[in-house]
Amino acid sequence: MLSDLKMPQMDGLALARRILSTIPLTPFFLMTADDSVHTKAIREFGVPCLIKPLSLEELLARIQKVIGRPLLPS
């Protein structure tokens, strides 16, 4: 699951809390332009934050690391 931190109805930390309490093994990433949220997200939920702007290569590498297999053919 990839979510932005700031959303209109629910912030990304609340979404992470809701999803991970229901399906704990869900790979979850937060995107944010606020670097200070990174520590809170990891400490409370073990959820890595991707700091915006981020490249597609960085996103794919982080997802690949979590799921343990390549996302794109070599």
Image: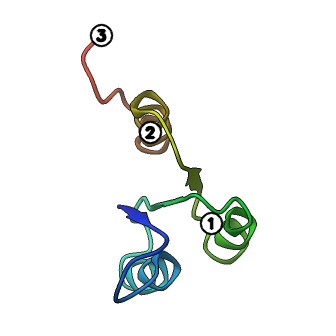
Residue 74 circle label: 3
**Residue 70 placement: quadrant:** top left
The CA span between labels 2 and 3 is 17 Å
What percent of the width, then of the height, locates residue 34? Answer: 64, 63
Q: Mark 1 or mark 3, which is nearer the start of the sequence?
A: 1
Q: Mark 3 or mark 2, which is nearer the start of the sequence?
A: 2
Which residue is labeled 2 in the image?
Answer: 59
Residue in the picture at 47% in, 32% down: 61
The CA span between labels 2 and 1 is 17 Å
Which residue is labeled 1 in the image?
Answer: 46
SS category of the residue bearing label 2: helix
- Image quadrant in which the N terminus is located: bottom left
What percent of the width, then of the height, locates residue 45? Answer: 61, 74
SS category of the residue bearing label 3: loop
Q: Mark 1 or mark 2, which is nearer the start of the sequence?
A: 1
**Residue 21 placement: quadrant:** bottom left
Residue in the picture at 48% in, 45% down: 66
